[in-house]
């Protein structure tokens, strides 16, 4: 019984620490502290304030990636984010949720993979087990329940293909990171 309560307390303290980290004034300081919690994050990442990370030790973020304000990164089942990914403000990426058919409301989930050059527009929701292919775009407010093919633009609830994207992407978002915000 004591072990269960200790695990809950430990989880709560880690949640508060990650919340504190998200309010610190410099990207490099936020990255350093998340690395201390075993997150694999390039130094050339923009982590804008008030993001939320769950289980940072299961999080990997490539170079040139930008994480917008109020983004939720649930890495409890594993979250891999590639290079030059733009995750806009208020995006939610979930790797764990509840099984609505479970008699005891059990948790279920799978890792999420966001490949290079993906753009997740504001208020996008990515559900567990989804892979977003290289260069794909998810339109604002879309809910992604299935894998998205490379260089495909999806939108809606649930997200469906609506366009194709240029496949000759070469930009480096690390040049766009503002140092203090």
Image (tube, rainbow, N blue to C red):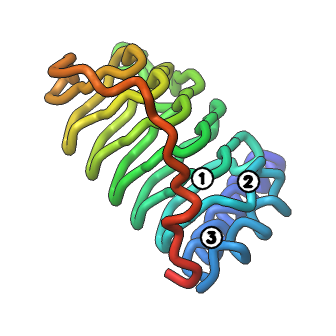
- In 3D space, how far apart are the residues under numbered discs 1 and 3 (Cα atoms)? 27 Å
Q: Are marks 1 and 3 in contact (CB under 8 Å)?
A: no
Q: Which residue is mark 1?
A: 64
Q: Which mark is residue 105?
A: none
Upstream in the sequence, badge 3 or badge 2?
3
Q: Of the residues under marks 1 and 2, which one precedes in the sequence?
A: 2
Q: Is residue 28 above or below residue 35?
A: below
Seen in the picture, residue 96 relative to 163 is either above or below; the reply is below
**Residue 5 location in percent, x, y?**
73, 53
- Exactly how many numbered labels are in the figure? 3
* Rendering quarter of residue 111: top right
Q: Which residue is mark 3?
A: 16
Residue found at x 73% / y 77%: 29
Instruction: Find residue 42 and name its label.
Output: 2
The N terminus is located in which quarter?
top right
The answer to whether residue 105 of the structure is visible from this angle is no
Task: Give the alpha-carbon distance from disc 3 to disc 2, as whole Å.
Answer: 23 Å
Task: Estimate the spatial distance between the alpha carbons at disc 1 and disc 2, rounded to whole Å.
Answer: 8 Å
Mark 3 surroundings: few (<14), some (14-19) or many (≥20) residues within 10 A: few
Identify whether 27 is placed above or below 4. below
SS at mark 2 in the image: loop
* Vertical relation: 3 (above or below) 22: above
- Residue at 44% across / 40% down in the picture? 93
SS for dot 1: loop
> 143 or 61, which lies in front?
61
* Viewer-nearest residue: 97 or 176: 176
- Residue located at (56% from left, 84% from top): 180
The label nearer to you, 1 versus 2, is 1
Query: In the rendered structure, are the residues bearing label 1 and label 2 in contact, judged by CB atoms less than 8 Å apart?
Result: yes
Dot 3 falls on a residue whose secondary structure is helix
Position of residue 52 measured from the top left corner of the image (x, y, whole percent) = 52, 60
Give percent across and percent down for residue 44.
Answer: 68, 60
């Amino acid at each position: 019984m004591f072990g269960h309560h200790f695990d809950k307390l430990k989880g709560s303290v880690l949640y508060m620490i990650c919340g504190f980290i998200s309010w610190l004034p410099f990207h490099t300081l936020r990255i350093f502290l998340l690395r201390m919690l075993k997150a694999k994050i390039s130094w050339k990442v923009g982590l804008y304030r008030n993001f939320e990370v769950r289980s940072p030790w299961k999080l990997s973020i490539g170079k040139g990636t930008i994480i917008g304000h109020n983004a939720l990164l649930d890495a409890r089942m594993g979250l891999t984010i590639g290079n030059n990914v733009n995750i806009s403000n208020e995006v939610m990426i979930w790797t764990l949720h509840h099984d609505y058919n479970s008699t005891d409301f059990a948790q279920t989930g799978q890792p999420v993979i966001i490949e290079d050059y993906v753009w997740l527009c504001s208020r996008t929701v990515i559900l567990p087990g989804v892979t977003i292919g290289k260069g794909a775009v998810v339109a604002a407010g879309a809910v992604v329940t299935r894998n998205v093919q490379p260089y495909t633009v999806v939108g809606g609830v649930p997200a469906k293909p609506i366009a194709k994207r240029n496949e000759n992407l070469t930009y480096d978002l690390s040049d766009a990171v503002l140092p203090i915000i």
